[in-house]
Amino acid sequence: MAEVELAPDSLIEQNVTSKTVQQSKTDSVSFFGLFAAADATDCVLMFLGSVGSCVHGAALPVFFILFGRMIDSLGHLSNNPHKLSSRISEHALYLVYLGGVVLVSAWMGVAFWMQTGERQTARLRLKYLQAVLKKDINFFDNEARDANIIFHISSDAILVQDAIGDKTGHAIRYLSQFIVGFAIGFTSVWQLTLLTLAVVPLIAVAGGAYTIIMSTLSEKGEAAYAEAGKVAEEVISQVRTVYSFVGEEKAAGSYSKSLDNALKLGKKGGFAKGVGVGFTYGLLFCAWALLLWYASILVRHHKTNGGKAFTTIINVIFSGFALGQAAPNLGSIAKGRVAAANIMNMIASASRNSKKLDDGNIVPQVAGEIEFCEVCFAYPSRSNMIFEKLSFSVSAGKTIAVVGPSGSGKSTIVSLIQRFYDPTSAILNNEVAWFDMDEHNTGSLTAMLAADATLVRSALADRLSTIVQNVALTVTAFVIGFTLSWKLTAVVVACLPLLIGASITEQLFLKGFGGDYGHAYSRATSLAREAIANIRTVAAFGAEDRISIQFASELNKPNKQALLRGHISGFGYGITQLLAFCSYALGLWYASVLIKKNESNFGDIMKSFMVLIITSLAIAETLALTPDIVKGSQALGSVFGIIQRRTAITPNDPNSKMITDVKGEIEFRNVSFKYPMRPDITIFQNLNLIVPAGKSLAVVGQSGSGKSTVISLVMRFYDPDLGSVLIDECDIKSLNLRSLRLRIGLVQQEPALFSTTVYENIKYGKEEASEIEVMKAAKAANAHEFISRMPEGYKTEVGERGAQLSGGQKQRVAIARAILKDPSILLLDEATSALDTVSERLVQEALDKLMEGRTTILVAHRLSTVRDADSIAVLQNGRVAEMGSHERLMAKPASIYKQLVSLQHETRDQQDH
């Protein structure tokens, strides 16, 4: 775990200061602020990587020095083909030596930067999660959303890693090539270089404007994608509720709508990038034209010779190319700076409680006496007072019961004691079983939507444009080369399979373990999401450090793989660069052969060779994008794997039977069932059960007997392995699933509310409902009174998963939603379990009215709530052990139901005493 573990005095805590994140939370950090997580080892890696990138960048200008000297000396040997050929062969050997230097420097520039990028990003992920876990509960209730936090851990972290990894190495390489090229130009023909520098300020202004615009758009784009992530996380985590209310299209529409802004910003970013890069290259071409014109004047007036003029011109030209090629990498760095601000703002911000976790006196022993002394409290998100000068005490070793109506503050007392507060659309087509798989949990899917989409966007947007550009350049160059000297061009083309083969080999190595690499991050993200979703439990048990250790452990595998991944990428890139220089050497040697045999002249050879140099550089640059393309293709594969997957249960099968009227008779006919994720445990074995239309059936039994499974099969969240579930004597497999679910109302044991207003949550049951209908449903569910007392009434935001409401309030809103749906079949899974005694009685009365004339299946653990059902089915060993009314089952000798009732009475009596 040492790779990602951070000591309290680690560099990141020292570096994430006002200098890096003093600005508002939407600002970007400085360039050096990106490296706040670097330790001593990372500094060494960055130094070695920078040296490699600088040497690699300087190699091409050095090559042009050799080439210029060759041209200068060969001008005097044009009448002696044999000496000319010998001199060219000698320079070809120099190119091979230079290629060896490039191999090592390219490997260093890529491998070490990739490795340090992985290491630093792992620390940022860990430190971010630690900072989040130390936040007080008020932060989660009012400021944070689970989806935002997951987005920062996954998508933002990828952008940061992209920025501080090999993209910085490539940027240093191109800037080194630019600086060295101009320096050589000044030492060769300073007049030409100075003339070119007149254009540099214009290029600098264009580049600065481009960076500022891209940073601004990137900030807004990140916010838009984070908002979309909220929608996705909420829908996926509550997918059963979405399915039961046939909300797939609405959820997909909300997600699509939240992406519209990101799409618009993406288009603006693409346009800005196109204008910026196009303007830069346009200025460069103008500068080159001016350069060639002035060079001809200097040579004509004997101010310089052809070799020096060539060295200067070609270095200045390729320095301009380098500046243009640095632009995409600088764009990635700009995006990374924005993403880093999101992460580092969290690390730098100090929660009141986070600084107090280890402060204060150490209590060696707790007697247990608790006292509330004139406590005044209101939730930070609500203005109404919960407690006003509340005072009471609990003696050590004694038990106190806290009772009161829903919303009176019972749970708030526990929160105060634990110091939670201080006193003052492809995915939704899949069946439910698919979401039960570990790899398809909420954390993994939301991370996939954020991280994989980021990788695909990066591969397609930035990298694909470079590839298309280089392909066009290569085709044009080959046409020119074959026209000038087809033999020389053919020899150089023959080298291409070596370059491509080396790249393919690198790609296969990367892809071979890329799946495990991505899966490791998915597991880490899922762990983070579970911890954040259950933050109260984590805080109550003081498990923040334990979660951090587990998270760090999950990051260790990709952190270790980064070493191998970096060296493979670096070595593969170095080999392609070496082969490029070897192809130059081979081309020069063969050019000497052609000149020696008088099959070509020096002028055509030089033209062809320069064209082929540019071509090989473009090909090598394209092959250098292999790691990004591999990441993008793997991400694209995972995304399209979900999109193209054929669901086992089609929600809107065009061949299925639409239903317009449901009487409500339900029958389980010889049903056998095992959960897909628990194939060794039999839930039902030849289960037979009939619920007449308009009647109520209570399903009871011991824990694990399959009570809730009955509801899942009626909702067709799952299909039985054998047998059939029928409604009105029709197998539900033959019915259109969405039309069926529209006629079934479901209230689950855990009420699932969406992060919107109370009004919108109730209206979710019937989209076209009027305000009067919503209020009527709320009154029937005994919810109207407490809603009206809220400051915003029905417009009150309920918070993420209804965090702003008490348990009883959430359940009543969920019941109101089911009442508004006006279903033919009602499924109640412990619908009143979260209510206090008064609310339970009132809601039960409302449910009794709702159940009249409707087929109802009631699942209950508390048997006192089922006695009025028309029939009671007792499940045992996968079958209906006995069935009948409450009176009939209680009168039956040795009744299993009677034993369950007696057992609950005994348990309750023991608890009372």
Image: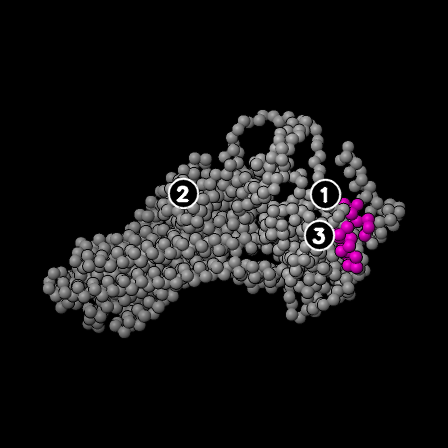
Q: Earlier in the sequence, mark 2 or mark 3?
A: 2
Dot 2 corresponds to which residue?
A: 22
As drawn, the label of residue 559 is none
Q: Secondary structure at mark 2?
A: loop
Q: Are marks 2 and 1 in contact (CB under 8 Å)?
A: no
The local crowd at label 3, few if under 14, some if 14 to 19, many if 20 or more residues have their Cα within 10 Å, is some
The local crowd at label 1, few if under 14, some if 14 to 19, many if 20 or more residues have their Cα within 10 Å, is some
Residue 531, image quadrant: top right
Dot 1 corresponds to which residue?
A: 836
Mark in the foreground, 1 or 3: 3
Q: Is residue 395 magenta?
A: no
Q: Which residues are magenta?
A: 845-869
Q: Position of residue 157 (x, y in %)?
A: 46, 49
The quarter of the picture where the C terminus appears is top right
- What is the basis of the colouring in this image? one colour
Q: Amino acid at mark 2?
A: Gln
Q: Earlier in the sequence, mark 1 or mark 3?
A: 3
Q: Position of residue 880 (x, y in %)?
A: 80, 53
- Residue at the image point whose x is 53% and y is 46% from the top: 144
- Residue at the image point whose x is 54% and y is 53% from the top: 230
Q: Secondary structure at mark 1?
A: loop
- Alpha-carbon span between mark 2 and mark 3: 50 Å
